[in-house]
């Protein structure tokens, strides 16, 4: 099943999340690590502090495993909507934002 997801990111944890997305920690998680990384690469900042993306998930509760392992630590106010297919979300790349945020923190 494919869901459109909307959530607020927790800024103080953003650097840690990006590190886990890029160091192999999350991509190695079974069964959903590859989809989490791919989803975050597709995710868009739609308004300040809000991210939207599409994600495939087969948990009985939408994003159940993803939330238990990562999302509930890095996001709040997570909303899911069952959709027919992946779509486009207008906004700025969340991945690029996290990358810039991480670089900024390293310089400080």
Image (spheres, rainbow, N blue to C red):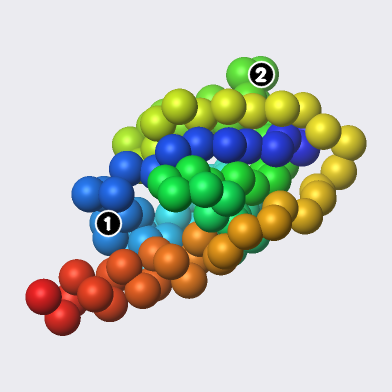
> Image quadrant of residue 3?
top right
Which residue is identified by label 1? 16
Tell which residue pokes out farthest to the front in this image: 47
With respect to residue 91, does 51 lie above or below?
above
The quadrant of the rendering that contains the C terminus is bottom left
In this rendering, the answer to whether 5 lies above or below 60 is: below
**Residue 59 against residue 13 in the figure, above or below:** above
Residue 62: % across, % down = 63, 25
How far across and down, in percent of the image, does residue 37 sit?
54, 58
Where is 44 relative to 62, above or below? below
Discs 2, 1 touching: Cβ within 8 Å: no
Of all residues, the one furthest to the left in this rendering is 108
* Residue at the image point whose x is 22% and y is 49% from the top: 12
Residue wearing tag 2: 60
- Locate residue 64: give its quadrant: top right
Residue 92 visible, this angle: yes
Q: Earlier in the sequence, mark 2 or mark 1?
A: 1
Tell which tag, 2 or 1, sits nearer the viewer.
1
Per the rendering, the mark at residue 77 is: none
Residue 37 seen in render: no
Badge 2: residue crowd in 10 Å (few <14, some 14–19, many ≥20): few
Residue drawn at the location 51% of the way across and 29% of the way down: 78
Residue 92: x percent and y percent? 57, 64
Q: Secondary structure at mark 2?
A: loop
């Amino acid at each position: 099943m494919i869901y459109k997801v909307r959530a607020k990111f927790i800024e103080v944890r953003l650097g840690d999340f990006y590190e886990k997305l890029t160091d192999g920690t999350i991509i190695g998680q079974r069964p959903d690590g590859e989809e989490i990384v791919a989803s975050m690469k597709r995710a868009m900042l739609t308004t300040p502090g809000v991210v939207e993306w599409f994600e495939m998930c087969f948990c009985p509760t939408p994003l159940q495993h993803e939330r238990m392992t990562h999302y509930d630590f890095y996001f709040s106010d997570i909303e899911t909507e069952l959709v027919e297919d992946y779509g486009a979300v207008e906004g700025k790349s969340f991945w690029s934002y996290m990358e810039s945020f991480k670089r900024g923190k390293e310089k400080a």
